[in-house]
Amino acid sequence: MKYTFENKVEFYITNVCNLTCENCNRFNNHRFTGWQRWSDYADTYRRWGEYVNLKNIVILGGEPTLNPTLSEWVVGLNDIFKCNIQILSNGLQLKANPDLYSALANIKSDNGMACGNIEISLHNLDHFDQIRNSVKSFLQPINEEYGTAINVAHKYNSDNHALYAVRDVNNVLVRMHLANSFHDAAVYRNSQGQFALRDSDPIQAHSGCGFAQYKCYHFIRGQLYKCGPVALMPEFDQQHNLAISDQDRLLLNSYQPLTVDDWPGPAVDWLARLDDPIAQCKFCPTITKQNITIYPTVKGSNAS
């Protein structure tokens, strides 16, 4: 019997981003390079499809539209898991993948309706008109539009932060929500200007963690992780040599993700503990501050 993930499962496909949003919780505001080619992992995810059912997939980064194979990810994941697929984007590079629209339009639910969509995180209110115009030029003729002003919500929204939604004649949906403030991130610069990690009580850090609250499980390079930071901190360390002790570096690299080869044996126990705190939670902050404005600026748009 397959294991079913009732919540969304996130597929992280690139470290590259065109914005520098302070306190990005996947550290993409810094020079964090590398992206994943679909063809390198397609066979692995096909094997995953033999063991798990996914109901909702979110493809993200970084900025996923800067991954040159994004359209292949959309088509490939849909072929395997046949579920709703959402792309989480900042909306500034929607036309970077010429085949993206057709890939989304061809994701069909059981009733034949398109179920591919884009969720745009608006990091700067000044970009609202620019992104809205970009969305309209990306889509086919508009069928429904909600929220033409910044303070208007729409009926497709599942939270209270949506600004805008538009659905075209092919049922492709694009929604926009405001995300102009973040919590503290795990990676920060210490008093010497070096990249470092937090040193928190892991239980307290986990109790206030948004990744834990919203069950943001991450597939990265064909492996399943409890969250994004535990997957990305070792890679960031490889690129930037974090100012941490040898003991902390050992702990950082000791986390074991779930692999497709772990089925069926070790997978059962691993999944049973998926929502528990882990020792690596100490590297994330204990959430004490809210609404830290991120002040995004544009940086280079090419994947590297």
Image (spheres, rainbow, N blue to C red):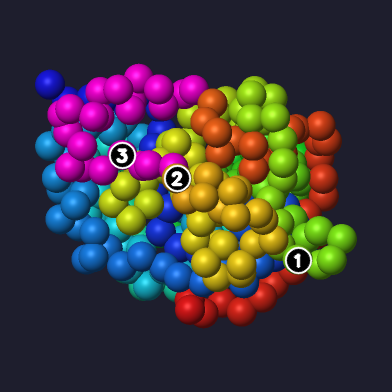
Quarter of the picture holding the N terminus: top left
Of 62 and 265, the residue lying toward us: 265
Q: Is residue 160 visible in this depiction of the protein? A: no
The outermost residue toward the right is 191
Residue type marked 2: Ser
Numbered mark located on residue 258 in the image: 3
Q: Is residue 35 visible in this depiction of the protein? A: yes
Q: Residue at x 66, y 75 (%)?
A: 299
Magenta residues, start to end? 255-276
Label 1 to label 2: alpha-carbon separation: 23 Å
Q: Residues within 10 Å of mark 1 (few under 14, many from 20)?
A: some
Q: Is residue 27 left or right of residue 38?
A: right
Label 2 to label 3: alpha-carbon separation: 13 Å
Mark 3 and mark 1 residues within 8 Å of each other at the beta carbon: no
Residue carrying label 2: 254
Task: Name the secondary structure under disc 1.
Answer: loop
Residue carrying label 1: 194
